């Protein structure tokens, strides 16, 4: 059975009405996002580097691609606040590693991502 309201139940606001504006993410949100994504990326990278099946490696590559996109996005936002001016090096390191999976490219990517995480924690 349906009940007809009296009109006093509470009204929805229209766009532009109301007092609360949507909150923009803060620097802390981007820092946490960067830390979490870099942790997930490093975990996937380390597992990827251990000779797994091609199916598992493809999954891990997808995880790394997704996390790198979040890392880039976070860095972009943090750059607006003066942080991590040279952090895009990690993205280049990742592409170098995908192009040529050598131990030197792995070490470079791993070390630069760890450095980025350290800088993020100090900011």
Image: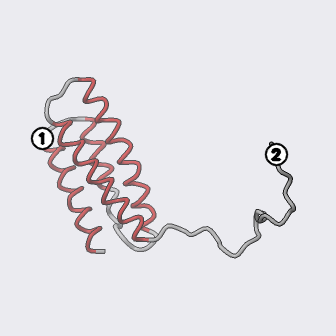
Do residues under tags 2 and 1 come within 8 Å of each other at their CB atoms? no
Q: Would residue 8 appear left or right of 82 to someone viewing this image? A: right
Could you say where residue 102 lies in the image, as x and y percent from the top left? 15, 37
Q: Nearer the viewer, residue 102 or 46?
A: 46
Cα–Cα span, label 2 and label 1: 69 Å
> Disc 2 marks which residue?
2
Sooner in the amino-acid sequence: mark 2 or mark 1: 2
Could you say where residue 97 lies in the image, as x and y percent from the top left? 24, 40
Q: Nearer the viewer, residue 32 or 61?
A: 32
> Disc 1 marks which residue?
103
Q: Would residue 5 appear left or right of 15 to someone viewing this image? A: right
Residue 111 occupies quadrant: bottom left
Image point (57%, 69%), residue name: 23
Identify whether 101 is placed above or below 26: above
Identify whether 75 is placed above or below 91: below
Q: Nearer the viewer, residue 99 or 48?
A: 48
Q: Quadrant of the C terminus?
A: bottom left
Q: Quadrant of the N terminus?
A: top right
- Comparing marks 2 and 1, which lies closer to the viewer? 2
Could you say where residue 81 lies in the image, as x and y percent from the top left? 43, 73
Image point (19%, 51%), residue name: 110
Residue reaching furthest to the top? 54
Please tell me whether mark 1 sits on a helix, a strand or a loop.
Answer: helix
Could you say where residue 78 lies in the image, as x and y percent from the top left? 41, 67
Mark 2: give few (<14), some (14-19) or many (20+) Cα within 10 Å.
Answer: few
Identify whether 73 is placed above or below 2: below
Image point (82%, 45%), residue name: 2
């Amino acid at each position: 059975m349906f009940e007809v309201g009296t009109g006093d139940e509470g009204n929805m606001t229209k766009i532009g009405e109301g007092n609360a504006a949507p909150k923009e993410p803060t620097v802390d949100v981007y820092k946490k996002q960067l830390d979490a994504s870099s942790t997930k990326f490093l975990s996937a990278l380390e597992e990827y580097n251990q000779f797994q099946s091609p199916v598992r490696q493809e999954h891990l590559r997808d995880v790394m691609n997704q996390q790198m996109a979040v890392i880039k996005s976070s860095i972009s936002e943090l750059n607006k606040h003066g942080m991590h001016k040279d952090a895009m090096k990690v993205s280049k390191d990742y592409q170098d590693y995908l192009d040529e999976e050598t131990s030197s490219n792995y070490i470079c990517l791993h070390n630069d991502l760890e450095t980025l995480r350290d800088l993020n924690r100090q900011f």
